[in-house]
Amino acid sequence: MSTSESSPALPVVLDAQRLATLHRHLLAWFEQYGRDLPWRRTRDPYRILVSELMLQQTQVERVRPKYEAFLQQFPTLEALAQASPGEVIRAWSGLGYNRRALHLQRAARAVLEQYGGRFPDTPAALERLPGIGPYTAGAVACFAFERDVAFMDTNIRRVLTRLFAGPAALADREVLRIAAAVLPAGQGWAWNQALIELGALVCTAARPRCQGCPVRSACHAYAVWRASDAQVFDAPPPTRPARAIAERRAPFETTQRYFRGRVVELLRGLPPGAWMSLAELGPQVKRDWREVDRAWLQQLLEGLAQDGLIELDRETGRARLP
Ligand code: SF4
C-alpha cells in the first residue's frame, strides 16, 4: 500500500468531463448512502488510528462494538501508552491479528515520546511511527487532518482499477498514480471515504452490483463487460489472487495463524499476571496433541514471544501475556 500527495500523469486516458461527472455522482451517492460510522464522526487522529488498525482485515460490523469498547477502556493516547501490552492484547479480543494491538500501542507511545502527544499530520511523518504502514499513514492524514492524500486499500484499489482500467489488474504503482490524479482538490476526505464505501457496498470483489452503481456511466469495466457478454456484466467472475485460493484450501484450524491466535486467546482467559504451563497449553491449543508436539509448541511460543505478544519463562516452561 502506498500514498501520494503529488499529481503525476495519468496512466490511462481520462477526459475532464468524465472525471467531473464521476466526482459529482460518487460524492452525491456517498452523502446519501454512506454509512454513519463512529470513526466518520470524528477528526481525532487517535480515534482514527484506532479505527484504521481495527479495520485492517476485519469487517466493519465486527469492528464497530470493539471500537467503542476499546475507546472506553483507553479514551486517550496517554491511557493507551501507559497500559501494559497485556491489557491492550486483552482489549483486542475478538478482532484477531493481535499484532495490530501492539502496533497501535507502540505508535501511541512514539507520538507521546517524539511529538509530545500531538500527532504529526503528513503521511511521511506518520509512516515513521512504529507499526504504521503507507496505507494507515495516508488514511490518518486524510481522515483526521483532511489532507488531500491519495492512498489505497483493497477497496480503493479495486474500484479505481475497474473505473479507469477495466477488468484487468493494474500494478499498485499505477493505481496510486490514478488515485493521485483523480483526487478532487479540497475533497480528499469525502472522496476517499466514498471510494472505500463503494468498494464495500457496491463494487465488491466477487459480485459488483453494476446495475445499481452510481458511477457506471463512467466505468471502464462496466463498459467492457457490457460489450463482451451481457450475461457476465452483472456478476463478473471473482478475481481472487492465486495465493488466496491456495490458502483457502488449507482448513484454518491447521494454520500457524490459528494456533498463534489460540495461544493468545487461552492466555487472555487467565487473571492478569498469571502463567500457564506448556503442559496445560498443549492439549488446549492442538486437538490431537501428543507429547512429541512439545518442540513444535515451544517454537510457536518463541515466535509469539519474539513478536511481543507473550512472555515466555523458558526455565519453568510457562507463558503469559506481557
Ligand atoms: S459499474 Fe460495476 S465495476 Fe464499475 S464501479 Fe460500479 S460496481 Fe464497480
Image (tube, rainbow, N blue to C red):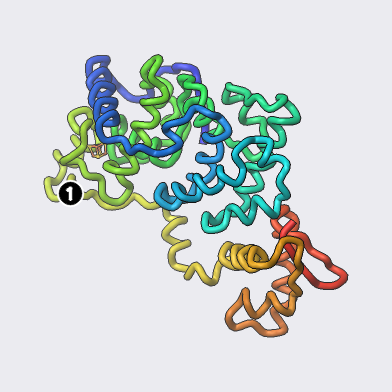
Q: Relative to residue 138, is residue 102 drawn left or right?
A: right
Q: Residue 228's x, y, as percent?
A: 16, 42
Q: Relative to residue 24, is residue 190 drawn left or right?
A: right
Mark 1 residue element: loop
Residue to which mark 1 is pinned: 232
Q: Relative to residue 148, is residue 169 drawn left or right?
A: left
Callout 1: few (<14), some (14-19), or many (20+) C-alpha neighbours within 10 Å?
Answer: few
Residue drawn at x 48%, y 23% is: 149
Give the farthest residue toward the front.
72
Which quarter of the frame holds ligand 1? top left
Residue drawn at x 35%, y 33% is: 195
Residue drawn at x 21%, y 32% is: 214
Quadrant for residue 278, please give it: bottom right
- Please name whichever residue, 211 or 141, is drawn nearer the observer in this view of the structure: 141
- Please name whichever residue, 187 or 34, is drawn nearer the observer in this view of the structure: 34
Q: Residue 60's x, y, as percent?
A: 41, 47
Amino acid beneath label 1:
Val
Give the answer, above or below, for where 99 lies relative to 212: below
Give the answer, above or below, for where 69 lies relative to 218: below
Give the answer, above or below, for where 61 lies relative to 247: above
Question: Does any atom of ligand 1 lie closer than 8 Å to the CB of label 1?
Answer: no
- Please name whichever residue, 286 or 227, is drawn nearer the observer in this view of the structure: 286
Give the farthest residue toward the right.
315
Give the answer, above or below, for where 295 lies relative to 110: below
Q: Residue 298's x, y, as percent?
A: 75, 70
Numbered label tally: 1
Quarter the C terminus occupies: bottom right
Q: Residue 173's x, y, as percent?
A: 47, 31
Residue drawn at x 51%, y 22% is: 145
